[in-house]
Amino acid sequence: MSKVFLCGDPHGEFDHILSAIDQWHPDAVLILGDLTPSHSLDEIFKGVKGTKIYWIPGNHDTDSDLIYDRLWRSSFAKHNLHGRVQDVCGVKVAGLGGVFRGQIWMPPAMPLYASPSLFIRKIGKSGMWRGGLPRRHRSTIFQSVYEKLKECKADILITHEAPSMHPKGFKALDDLAMKMGCKIIFHAHQHESKRYCPCNGLCARGIGLRGIIDLEGNVIVPAQVDPRELEAKVQSAPSPVRAQLRRTPASKFRRLNRFNRFNRFNRFSRKGWSNKSPKKERQG
Ligand SMILES: [Fe+2]
């Protein structure tokens, strides 16, 4: 069986992908959106030989003209699997990048604009970017792309958005995978490494932030903890725990030092503590 790796949101970091390619020599690597590269993909993957690189866009890949051009104006633009099926080393891979956006389509509601051309007609020339869709909506899922994909057959579906097994996921993606005959959906975006219970015979796997797994779900590179998730945990923790979490070794040392200084000169005053020296107390 061919060795295919799947990568969760790299968010500008590619060293772990390059190291995994160096170490394991996979036949192909699929990157599931939010690449937000700091250089052109040509530059990043210039040393890679014998491993095919494919990708789908994430919501952040259209954040700026620079990021957009580093992806879509590189030679890897033709390796974008969004809205199509590609034979990747014997595995039929269907790709659906981007996210659902309320201005266009937020399933299960009906779409406001079913296709890019309908949206362009609405916004007119003044709203266009480089003669077409506004940049932001180049990472938006349109129903027309979704329906076209639904007519194809594939072995696996890779998406940026999560399917319904995730609390913030979409059943529309389950329906798409099942209609296409896919046995499993791999998704990114939520920055959570998760193996879901199969639902109606459909398996799903979430790939965490900068994590890498293979087609069987084996972890090649463990995902990183999302800093937003860590901050949320700190915020929701009860206050003494929060203080504990925020306590750095340096601040701990300062606190201890201050305590010792006051104690040495016997001037530390606190409820339940005596200002008198132990000697005087014994005398009293
Ligand atoms: Fe994302």
Image (cartoon, rainbow, N blue to C red):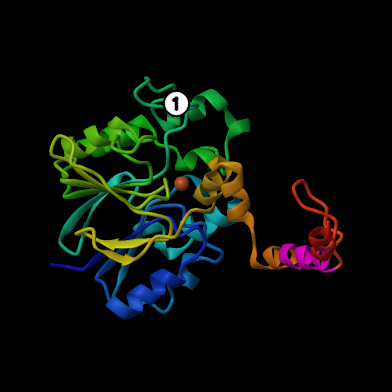
Please state the horizontal and vertical placement of residue 55, each as a whole percent of the image: 37, 57
Q: Nearer the viewer, residue 140 or 17?
A: 17
Q: Nearer the viewer, residue 254 or 127?
A: 254
Image quarter (top left, top right, bottom left or bottom right) of the N terminus: bottom left
Residue 72 is left or right of residue 272, and the answer is left
Q: Label 1 belongs to which residue?
A: 118
Where, by quadrant of the figure, is residue 190 drawn? top left
Residue 101 is left or right of residue 158, and the answer is right
Please state the horizontal and vertical placement of residue 148, each as a whole percent of the image: 26, 36
In the rendered image, is residue 16 in sight? yes
Span highlighted in magenta in the image:
255-264
Relative to 203, say whether 27 is above or below.
Answer: below
Please state the horizontal and vertical placement of residue 65, each as a whole percent of the image: 59, 51
Q: Kindly identify the residue that appears in the image at 71 percent across and 63 percent down.
A: 251
Relative to 163, say whether 194 is above or below.
Answer: below
Relative to 130, say whether 78 is above or below.
Answer: below
Where, by quadrant of the figure, is residue 261 drawn? bottom right
In the rendered image, is residue 63 in sight? no
For badge 1, the amino acid type reads Leu
Which secondary structure, mark 1? Answer: helix
